Image: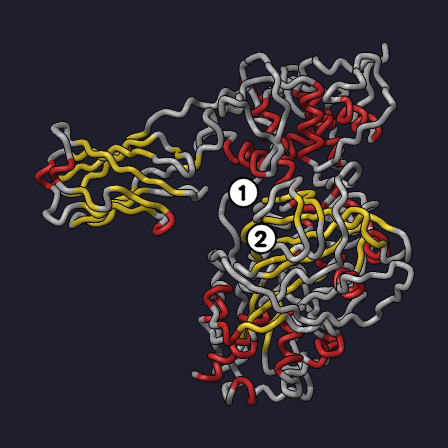
Amino acid sequence: MPGMRKLIDLIIFLAGIGAGYEISQHRKPASERDISELGFTRKALRSAQFSWSRFFGENQNAIAIITLTSCALVFGSVLQNYGYIFKASLLDLPQTEFTGTTIPITHVPNWTELSEAERTMRFDQIPKSKIIPIPDYNLRNMKKGEVWEDATDAQRNAYITYPVPNLGNYKLDATENSGSHPGIDIKTLIGTPVHSIANGIVYKVGNQSTGFGKSVSVAHVNIPDPRNPGQTTTLVSTYAHMSKTNVREGEKVSKGQIIGESGDTGFATAPHLHFQIDRSDADFIPYWPFTYAELQAAGYNSNFDAVKGGFGRQKAKQYTEHPFNFIARFSNNDIDLNNLVALDDTIIPGVIENVDTPLGIETPDVEIIDTPENNKIEKWESTEGPSEEEMQASAPNSDPTQVELAEKPPVNQPMTQTIRKGKLEISFETDQSYTPGQNETITIRINEANLVATAGIEMSSTLRDRAKVTPAVLKASDFDANGEAEVIIKTSSEYPFRLVAVSDFGEIKSPSLKPEIFKDIPGSHPYSSAVKYLKDNNIVKGYEDGTFRPDATLNRAEALKLILEANSIYAESTDQNNFNDVGNTAWFKPYIETAFKREIVKGYPDGSFKPGNTVSRAEFLKMALATGNFPLPEFGSDPFPDVKADAWYAPFFAFARDQKLIRTSTGNTAVPNNPITRGEAADIIYKLSQIVTR
């Protein structure tokens, strides 16, 4: 069905942003097009003059609907009221020489020439003959690309490459200042090299399973201020949804340096690069022009609706720069700071540079619905990302005391699973966890070695080629007198997997093995997801002996550091000292002063802060919720049997009860005055982060 094949092609290469839209033989003007799924209204792509038969052939009844979510993306990462307050202070960063700018993506495929199979390939798998310099960012050409029949290939490629322009909406209308989406979305294939637009210092490297996914933010210090000729400023460029990052925080990068590869991580169901530039006075970085509480107060139901309605556009204009205007303005290396002019219609020429080393990532399948007999519209919703959240955190090294948890996590023990196939009994013995990059030994036990087929037992894993299993085939001679043999598996993956045994008895899988986060946090630990979130996001690093010590308590200084860094709040050092027991050279002074300035803590009547005092569950909950500015619920009865309604901490425990933030003790008690442990604190922070993405 050539017509259907062409429809598939069009759908796949248009699937570049987080939006749901439909393509059908109904054609409406651009002003009526909109996005359908996930809170959007569903309308057609267009145009009244469009002759679909020239692109699709005669099969005009083929209809496809695709639902994507990638542009909901940043909302999960940047909601200030829900705990994601990004670092805003850029003081004390080293300066780098400004030598002009370049573009973040230099080459893309010729979208109009790709086959269906090529649209799902990695960048380095595409024939060089089908790779072109990135199209000009030219709104006039992009708009012409909407009318497919009348457009040139260059105009079509531009329209496809830039699905969401600066301060655009999600309507695919190639119109700036029609919404409040900061920055520009650039459609790519996974593995496309991403370049730093200028010399700078890596300010932040993010790695989230939601929101921006894998991202890099580069601070460009002491560069020309595009708003004030002759003056300099600090700007931060952010590159989001990457499949791979090549740099570390604090590292110097040069203009054009490959800092990673594009992907579809975070809230992205199709590969693209979200690219924006923030000013240094933004409240958080990467910047987003409204919080969840603000959009609700304004009467919007979702981030999608707020962006489409242009909510916060003036704030976005204030705190962000048009990224391609900035690049175009300073793209020449001989810059006269006193002779700058505004650019109203940016045209960014493609720059030819070498491209290499893309990294493949599985992308969601696209289901095509062919309805030749009628025009009934069915709904398809994509799946995205791994099933388990991966996130991160980092607390100070200290010597906290050990205490009992309200609910003690079980100690990880070896687990044996036995499966019977006729006369054969085969068992897998594993400790249920593994360390990425290291050999993991699994014991396999059978009741009679002579029951092993001559061909042996083929050994593999659910990770397939992402793990090496040795030996690949177990022979009867590999089993000792007790019927035991060992299999070694090694993988750099960080996902749960099972060992797979295949022989004439069929296929048998071992118990699931999960990645070990720290030596004392195996993959099966109750707090493994929470601690992994903190570790991956550089919030916690653990101790020098490789442990996390989940049962250890936190003091007030440690708790503040953990909470502020989990919310990406930069701790500023000042000359002011508001507490008589906080020394000017103490490592925790910036955290305490920042929290005091934000009215997260107040201290004691005697003027002290008592940084070494152990933090109770009630105190930690109050600090965490106050920092994230979470709305507290109304309640009338006692939230827990040991938390009375008139207690100062009752509202915080009412929130914790409703959101299932804490693990209770015997009799469903909250034990508010018990010291909080590192494991419990990690669990609360992780669960608060997930509230953002619900």
Q: Residue at 84% of width from left, 27% of height from top?
A: 574
Q: Give coordinates of residue 672: x percent, y percent.
A: 66, 18
Q: Residues within 10 Å of mark 1 (few under 14, many from 20)?
A: some
Earlier residue among tags 1 and 2: 2
Q: Nearer the viewer, residue 151 or 77?
A: 151
- Residue type at the position of mark 2: Gly
Q: Residue at 63% of width from left, 16% of height from top?
A: 675
Q: Secondary structure at mark 1?
A: loop
- Residue type at the position of mark 1: Glu
Q: Give coordinates of residue 154: x percent, y percent.
A: 64, 80
Q: Give coordinates of residue 475: x percent, y percent.
A: 14, 42
Q: Nearer the viewer, residue 510 or 162?
A: 162
Residue contact at pointers 1 and 2, CB within 8 angstroms: no
- Can residue 83 be seen by looking at this rendering? yes
- Can residue 633 be seen by looking at this rendering? no
Labels in figure, total: 2
Q: Residue at 50% of width from left, 43% of height from top?
A: 388
72 up-or-down from 615: above or below: below
The quarter of the image holding the N terminus is: bottom left
613 up-or-down from 332: above or below: above
Q: Secondary structure at mark 2?
A: strand
Can you tell which mark lies on residue 260? 2
Q: Give coordinates of residue 135: x percent, y percent.
A: 66, 73
Q: Which residue is mark 1?
A: 389
